[in-house]
Amino acid sequence: MSPIFEYFFGQYAEYETYQIVLEIVAVLFGIISAWCSKRNSIWVYPTGIVSTSIFVYLLWQWELLGDMLINVYYFTMSVYGWYVWTRKVSPNSYTPITWATKREHAISLGIFFGAIVFVYVVYELFEKWTSWTAYVDTLTTGLFFVGMWLLARRKVENWLYLLAGNIISVPLYFYKGYTISSMLYVIFVIISVLGYFAWKKNLHKDTVIA
């Protein structure tokens, strides 16, 4: 085995084959979901539900509690977002893409700090403060919680929160030993940038389900 391959993927030697396969499947569905989100397609949610369901199972097995909670929340927001995106606001259109209101910014702030407090309490109960990564997890959890809520409500700012969380997650997942997932977040960073500009172009346009 080459030193480079060993450096990036050596940790997978300890995993069961089915775990590696499941992670690859979850990553592929995650990429499809993110791309559908960028294209403002309702398929962001069914594909996202598949991806997050697999990740919840894997992260539970790997005892990554904070990351698992994020994906449980993703699953919940996917169901909520699916409802919002398919809810008609007029006989011929659905919930449009808009900027967040002052009230929604205030709620976002509450979600951010609420998520941090929630993860802190959970980590205290399960004694998970064993590495500096746990503290970073609380930050990314807050960012992703807000990003997913704003995505579900079709707000442009969702991409900014997701971009910040994705950038932090690239080295974080690599350090944790999950190279495939780290690569996924590299792709998420790119899609977040593309999604932000794509959604700005579609502000207030009548939205159709695709």
Image (cartoon, rainbow, N blue to C red):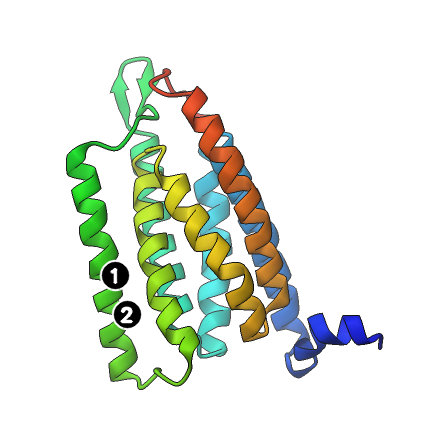
The image position of residue 190, as x and y in percent, is 57, 43
Q: Quadrant of the N terminus?
A: bottom right
In-image side of 116 versus 181 (left or right): left
The residue depicted at 72 percent of the width and 75 percent of the height is: 7
Choose between 70 and 159: the one closer to the eye. 159
Q: Would you call the spot at circle 1 few (<14 residues within 10 Å), some (14-19), or many (20 or more)? A: many
- The quarter of the picture where residue 208 lies is top left
- The image shows residue 71, relative to residue 126, as above or below, that is above
The image position of residue 19, as x and y in percent, is 61, 72
Q: Is residue 81 something that shows in the picture?
A: yes
Helix, strand or loop under label 2? helix
The residue depicted at 57 percent of the width and 50 percent of the height is: 29
Report which residue position mark 2 lands on.
119
Spatial CA distance of label 1 from label 2 is: 6 Å
Number of callouts in the render? 2
Whether residues under marks 1 and 2 lie with C-beta atoms below 8 angstroms apart, the answer is yes
The image position of residue 110, as x and y in percent, is 18, 52
Q: Would you call the spot at circle 2 few (<14 residues within 10 Å), some (14-19), or many (20 or more)? A: many
The image position of residue 45, as x and y in percent, is 43, 42
Report which residue position mark 1 lands on.
115
Helix, strand or loop under label 1? helix
In-image side of 168 versus 97 (left or right): right
Choose between 115 and 23: the one closer to the eye. 115
- The quarter of the picture where residue 65 lies is bottom left
Amino acid at pointer 1: Ala
Q: Is residue 41 something that shows in the picture?
A: no
Choose between 23 and 205: the one closer to the eye. 205
Amino acid at pointer 2: Val
The residue depicted at 42 percent of the width and 25 percent of the height is: 200
The residue depicted at 58 percent of the width and 61 percent of the height is: 182
